[in-house]
Image (spheres, helix red, strand yellow):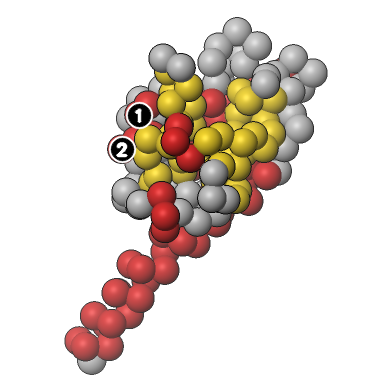
Amino acid sequence: MRVIAFLAAIYVAFTMPDTAAAGMLAQAQQFTGMHEVKHNRRLRAALGINPARTPWCGYFMGMIARKAGRQPPKSYSFASSWRHFGAPVRLSYARPGDVIVVRTGRGYHVGVLSALSKSTAQLIGGNQSGRVQLSQFSRRQVVAVRR
């Protein structure tokens, strides 16, 4: 009986992160196209801040994580804090739904992986050209992959 319980626990431990990651992608996709000015009221209510005045990619990811049943990092409003979310994953093993942190000039941006090619990571995230949308980032910009 203990062996069966142990094996069941291992199964849950290894399958749960994938399910949670997929949940984050599904949650993010529901907001695709929402603009920080055009949809300000709805985004302001969901994020708890005015996205037209505040950098909001971290706030968006915090909301998405909570909706998917995950605990965002303590300072989730800062994109760089997502480098410590969940468990680390090598970029070569990244899957849709994983959290990706990219370096953008002197700062960071965070989003949910939608697709990965040989040269780019396609992320869905908030505050990408002022809206929730899919954007391409070079794989060289990726500083963290978290599941």
Residue drawn at x 61%, y 29% as measured from the top left: 126
Q: Residues within 10 Å of mark 2 (few under 14, many from 20)?
A: some
The N terminus, quarter of image:
bottom left
Q: Residues within 10 Å of mark 1 (few under 14, many from 20)?
A: some
Residue flagged by tag 1: what amino acid is it? Ser
Residue flagged by tag 2: what amino acid is it? His
- Can you identify the residue that label 1 sits on? 81
The x and y percentages for residue 87 are 32, 50
Note whether 64 is above or below 96 in the view shown.
Answer: above
Marks 2 and 1 in Cβ contact (< 8 Å):
yes
The x and y percentages for residue 84 are 31, 38
Say whether residue 103 is left or right of residue 43. left
Note whether 104 is above or below 86 in the view shown.
Answer: above
- Can you identify the residue that label 2 sits on? 84
The x and y percentages for residue 59 are 51, 26
Residue drawn at x 42%, y 64% as measured from the top left: 16
* Distance of label 2 from label 1 (alpha carbons): 6 Å
| Camera-side residue of 60 and 115 | 115
Tell me, yes or no, if residue 67 can be seen here: no
Note whether 30 is above or below 58 in the view shown.
Answer: below
Label 2, secondary structure: give it. Answer: helix
Q: Quadrant of residue 137?
A: top right
